[in-house]
Amino acid sequence: MIVMKFGGTSVGNAERIKNVADIIKSRINKNPVVVVSAVSKITDALIEMARAKDKIKSSQMIKHIIKTHMQVIKGLGIEKTLLDEDIKELAALADNAKINSSIDLAALDKFQSFGERMSSKIVAAQLNKIGITAKAFNSWELGFLTDSEFGNAEPLEDTYDNLKKNIKKQHVVPVITGFIGKTENGEITTLGRGGSDYTAAIVGAAINAEEIEIWTDVNGILSADPKIVQNTHTMERVSFAEASELAYFGAKVLHPKTLLPAMDKNIPVRVLNSFEPGNSGTTIYKTIEKRRSIIKAIACKKKITMINVGSSRMLGAFGFLARVFDIFDDHRKSVDVVSTSEVSVSLTVDNDDGLEGIMEELGEIGTVQIEKNKAIICAVGEGMKQVKGIAGRIFSVLGNNNINVGMISQGASAINVTFIVDESIADKAVQTLHKEFFG
Ligand code: ASP
């Protein structure tokens, strides 16, 4: 069995959905289990609808959402009433919702769920139309249960057994909603933006799939962001470790959490392009053979804030770092890059939400300085472990190009070199390194 997950642009209109159904058909002998995202931009529209400040805005949004889906249905020539139930339910939800922009997370998840609920029905209908017996499932109908962390839910342990049991007994191609689940109390949850990849990996791990295919709109994972570098190339094979680093630090192809369930079960994840199905894309394996290339990709994440905490008390003392991290922990704020010296620690965060409170508490244990508009640059490659002088080469070429580097860090896995630059020169830094290592 394989899992095939299709993202929003892959199911963006009638033509794209026809194409998706054909791709699924071409792999029918592998017993595909399909996972789908909402039609492109529909999740955003549902959020806008949920947060509408007045009834006028809310009804504009629902009209837009209905129109988009009806156009798809018309383009495919499938049953016009297919989504009637969902549309009725969505309209009732909007009617009953209190109109205010600070809608609670549980209600927001309920709104968002309609995107995948509708797209899965459309994809299943199109498969049936071309002769593949398929059935749409809301993930919870197959036992996808989550905790009640609305907006960022995690699957419950039972989910894996439930999915295995329920999927194995289907004699049709299941087309499952990505991104959403339900709590044991029956409340709808979402796994976080881009969470359909995670659904695919969870389903893949549950059924012990041969492979998890993530169908998107680019040819796999590229050596750099093509908006920054012109002559990027697709990496054919990367390790889970490399892909995770890249996912966290800017390569937007995969949801970082996606890899965990697949990694645990050692299931290869292939990133493929539904606009170019013949392209072999990138495959992510647990381990990969030693490669000639030392560095495989250069990722970049902008809009970073850097926080420096200094304390002379840190000198030779213990517990300082623990206190710093406790503060971030208390505020549930995730830290990306860390670098320490004897008397200071620098950390980065990728948004400023809740930063004021953190700054105040950090101020009680040391001097705090904050620097905004930074970018993290991350050069990744398993080959770095074996080769000497890579850091030297990276920083020399940057220095020669007048690029000032701050806060350097290399994790214990030694597969990445990460550093911070001013956002204004981030593109130049990526271009310079790409040229140095790939020409
Ligand atoms: N539809 C959701 C989003 O736009 C989930 C996904 O596409 O993966 O974030």
Image (cartoon, rainbow, N blue to C red):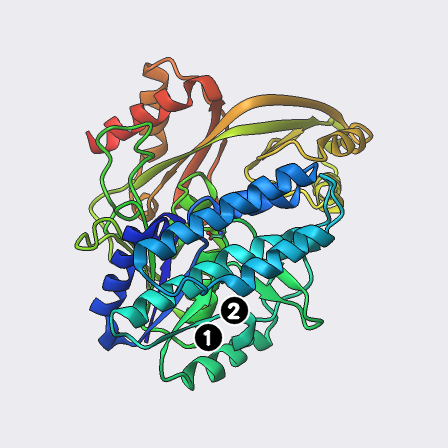
Location of residue 73 with respect to 375 vertically, above or below: below
Dot in front, 1 or 2 = 2
Disc 1 crowd rating (10 Å Cα; few below 14, some 14-19, many 20+) is: many
Quadrant (top left, top right, bottom left, bottom right) of the N terminus = bottom left
Location of residue 423 with respect to 48 vertically, above or below: above
Mark 2 residue type: Asn
Quadrant (top left, top right, bottom left, bottom right) of the C terminus = top left
Mark 1 residue type: Ala
Give the label on residue 206, or none: 1
Image quadrant in which you'd find residue 30: bottom left
Percent of width and height locating residue 271 = 31, 54
- Residue 263 in view: no
| Badge 1 or badge 2: first in the primary sequence | 2
- Residue ID for mark 2: 138
Give the SS element for disc 1: helix
Percent of width and height locating residue 196 = 47, 57
